[in-house]
Structures are given as C-alpha cells and as structure tokens.
Image (cartoon, rainbow, N blue to C red):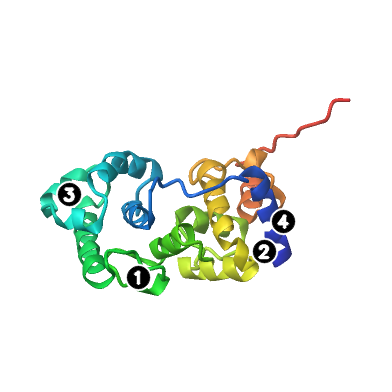
Amino acid sequence: MMTKKEWHLCLEEMDNMFPDAHCELVHRNPFDLLIATLLSAQCTDKLVNKVTSSLFQKYHRPEDYVAVTLEELQNDIRSIGLFRNKAKNIQALSRILIDQYDSQVPADRDTLMTLPGVGRKTANVVVSVAFGIPALAVDTHVERVAKRLGLNRWKDSPLQVEETIMKKTPAENWSKTHHQIIFFGRYHCKSQTPACHICPLFDRCREGQKRYKKGLVKREIITEVN
C-alpha cells in the first residue's frame, strides 16, 4: 500500500498539473449546487451543466420546484439519467427545506444526508464547495485514482477511500485535494484510456506498473537537447 510520504509526493504532482482545479458544476448558490450535485449522480458534469443552464433560469428557490407538477419537472430534466427518481427527490427535499429550514440549505453534512436523494458524496460536495467546510467527496474519479495508485485496495468501499485520503491528507487541504484528484482522473487517468505513457506518477502507481509489465504501456522517453 502507498505510504503517506508517497501520497504527498503524488499530491504535489497533481498540484503541479491542476493548480486551478475546481468544482465544474455551474451554480449560483448552495441550493443550486445541491440540485446540480444530486443531478450529477451517474451523469457527467458537462451534461448536468447543459441541463441546468435552462433549469436554473426557470427555478430559483425550493418554492419554484414544488410549484410545478412532477411531470413538468421530469420533462425539464429528461436528458439526465434517472430523471424520474431525481425529479421526485428534488421536489421532496424542496418541501423539507421550505417546511423545516426556512428554504435554506443546511451547512451540515449529517443533516443534508437526511434529505431525499442526498448521499454522503453529495453532502460532502455541498458543505465543502458551498460553505468552505473541510470535506472530501469520493466520486468515481477519486475512487478509481486512489485504487489505481495503490492508496487503497480494490475491494475498499468509497467510505474507506474517503477515510484513507483524509487520514493521509491535512484537513485544510481536503477540498483542494478532492478537486485535484477529480481533474487528474477526469482529464489524465481516465477510466478507459489512462495516460500512463506520460504520467508523472507512473513510478509510484501500482496499476501503471502492472500495465507496463504486461506490455500494455510504453513509456515516452524525453531527452534533453543541449
């Protein structure tokens, strides 16, 4: 398994590669971010942003989402995967926010997780991005990168990945680290075509070394010209 020192060296490289990594879900406020993150489950941020570009013009507050029929909301997000269930959850959580929280999004992960359709990942994203509270959300990119590098075992759960990264990363860097791992996984260590041949983490990567030994990876050797 990867040591804390090795992990910090990996984080330094990710920081060099993606110093401006950030949340790519377009939002105006914590409520928009909550809706966008809920919609992003099993869906790309790019598609979510395409849908919310018009959705957020029509809906601004929880009251707006409960003022329409479920069928109308479903139609507004129809291109999103699992749109029926997501529309149902959006209306249900909007009613709870209106009735119990004065239409405001709670800045507490455990409270957020009591809302319909809001899991640990979504709650972590909201408290981290919207409220600046140290948290580390584990999505498919974070989980894949952690396991490929050897920070976690392949059989570890997302919660175990979260706990491992938090244990080996200073709390003040959790949010930044979350975004940089996502960028690394989304744009470099991709699911189907990881850029192992030019990866600065190759020498420390368990999966990269395995692919190299199997002849699946050819390293690009760059020589300096005097």
Q: Secondary structure at mark 4?
A: helix
Find out whether the residues at labels 4 and 3 contact each other: C-beta distance under 8 Å: no
Where does residue 76 sit, x and y in percent of width and height?
20, 44
- Picture residue at 73% right of the left edge, 63% below the top: 5
**Residue bearing the label numbered 4:** 9
Specify which label sits upstream in the sequence, 1 or 3: 3
- Picture residue at 26% right of the left edge, 55% below the top: 61
Real-space CA distance between mark 4 and mark 3, rounded to the nearest whole angstrom:
45 Å
**Residue bearing the label numbered 1:** 113
- Looking at the rendered image, the quarter that the C terminus falls into is top right
Q: Nearer the viewer, mark 2 or mark 3?
A: 3
**Residue bearing the label numbered 3:** 74
The amino acid at mark 2 is Met
The amino acid at mark 4 is Leu
Instruction: Give the image quarter of residue 53.
Output: top left
Dot 2, how many residues are within 10 Å of its Cα: few (below 14), some (14-19), or many (20+)? some
The amino acid at mark 3 is Gln
